[in-house]
Amino acid sequence: MNYPTDLQPVPASTEACPPWQREAPLGAGGTGAVFRVRRGEEVRALKWYHPNPRAQDIQAALAHLAQFPMPSSSFLWPLEVVHEASLTDFGCLMPLREGRFRSLSDLMQNRPTSASYPAMRQLLRAAAELTQAFEAIHLLNLAWCDFSTGNVFIDPATGELQLCDIDGLCPAENLKPHFHPDPRFAAPELIEGHAPPSSDSDLFTLALALFCLLVGRHPMENPQLIFPTDAPRFHPPGDSAAPSELFGESRQAAARWKALTSSLREAFQLEFSNGVPDPQSRPSTKFWLSELRKASDQLIDCPTDGFASCVDTLIASGVEATTELAPRLCPICNREILPGARLVIDRQLNKENPPSPTIVLLTPETKLYQYHFSRDGEPREIVAQAQAHPNRPRTLGLRNVGNRSWKVVLSEGTEKQVDPGFVLELTDGAVVTIGDSNCHVYSNQ
């Protein structure tokens, strides 16, 4: 087909507006090709659609999405529909994806043995952002009809996520979605035609995507084995060695499974057993987000091979928070890892129904975000960063990278203030007030 050089937005602006100019191709797929386009100083991505018998449905869906503000910072959200001067062919303008993001499909092709595959800390952050993205579209009464790993791009260094090519979002309960679901990521009721796309079917899709992201493999290399009613239910291993039919020969994939918290492993087991026939038994986005954040807070690094894995703290509050934590066996080298200092974040100030305290194991990689201290905190805004003392590597400090000072009460009662940009050396028994939260420092000695 002929691709456009000059494009006009539709509906046309009432003000004089020059056309978009096509600059360079960025990629192509089954439904269209993507180009970099420019209008003056504005640069965007343009997806130009191949001829399609459901073109009107796709245009209507894109126009519907463009009415909403971007629901999550992870989305490359449709901005406007554009046409050639003839109005016969059309495309959709979106923000341009940054070059630091890599396709999850490409990362999985290299398997988790690749050094370029993101570390567990980054994977958990990406998984949390993906969960928030699904939660955000459900608030708009949308469902993701054709999700695949090709939609997911991750920055391996930070774990930030960008979600593109999202024209498969459609109103929930739509009986005639404009795209067919990818069978590798669709709920069984969609595959079998028993129900339209919905938030319930999306929960199955989300679980499949989270598993792929965290483990680096699809939970069943042959997806058809998941869905027949007479097939064995999916049941990953516990602490035993992963079977070859699930993880192949990948030692890293099996280690990533073992590195997760027990509650995450149990949630996947529930999703792919009871959740196959019963959508109501599938874990919610709220559950996934809470457990993913807990897992991220419970990561410790093996001093031998650097592999990060989660410690199940199982600490509720009060005196139990001072309990020494048992060593964790590294899933790679099987050596003991002793958890070090930790923060117990108590958000009880000015709260009628305070949540349970948050337990954060401290390593030089630990970052604390706004959501640690506020229920509605921005998930990408860092408030504090742990760092090792330059002369005493086993001694950790906490740098204030926010814009508000902290109040600190040391164990002997001395008070001090930590202004933005400064570092607090963490000592046992100190209490740090950050925003409306009290953070108690405990050693594991």
Image (cartoon, rainbow, N blue to C red):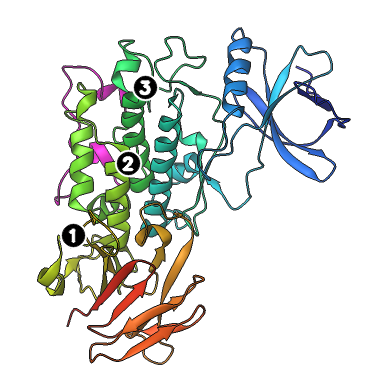
Amino acid type, mark 1 = Asp
- In this picture, which residue range is highlighted in magenta? 222-251
Q: Is residue 313 above or below residue 174?
A: below
Q: Where's residue 288, x and y in %?
A: 29, 43
Residue 312's label in the rendered image is: 1
The residue tagged 3 is 198
- Which residue: 25% across, 38% down? 246
Q: Residue 254 in magenta?
A: no
Q: Reading the chain from its start, which is encountered first: label 1 or label 3?
A: 3
Quadrant for the C terminus, please. Answer: bottom left
- Which residue: 32% across, 13% down? 195
Q: Is residue 353 visible?
A: yes
Residue 428 vs residue 234, the one in the foreground: 428
The quadrant where residue 305 appears: bottom left
Quadrant for the N terminus, please. Answer: top right
* Residue 40 as seen in the image, left or right of residue 388: right
* Residue 296 as seen in the image, left or right of residue 402: left
**Badge nearest the viewer, 2 or 1:** 1
- Which residue: 35% across, 16% down? 190
The residue tagged 2 is 211
Q: Reading the chain from its start, which is encountered first: label 2 or label 1?
A: 2
Q: Residue 223 in magenta?
A: yes
Amino acid type, mark 3 = Ser
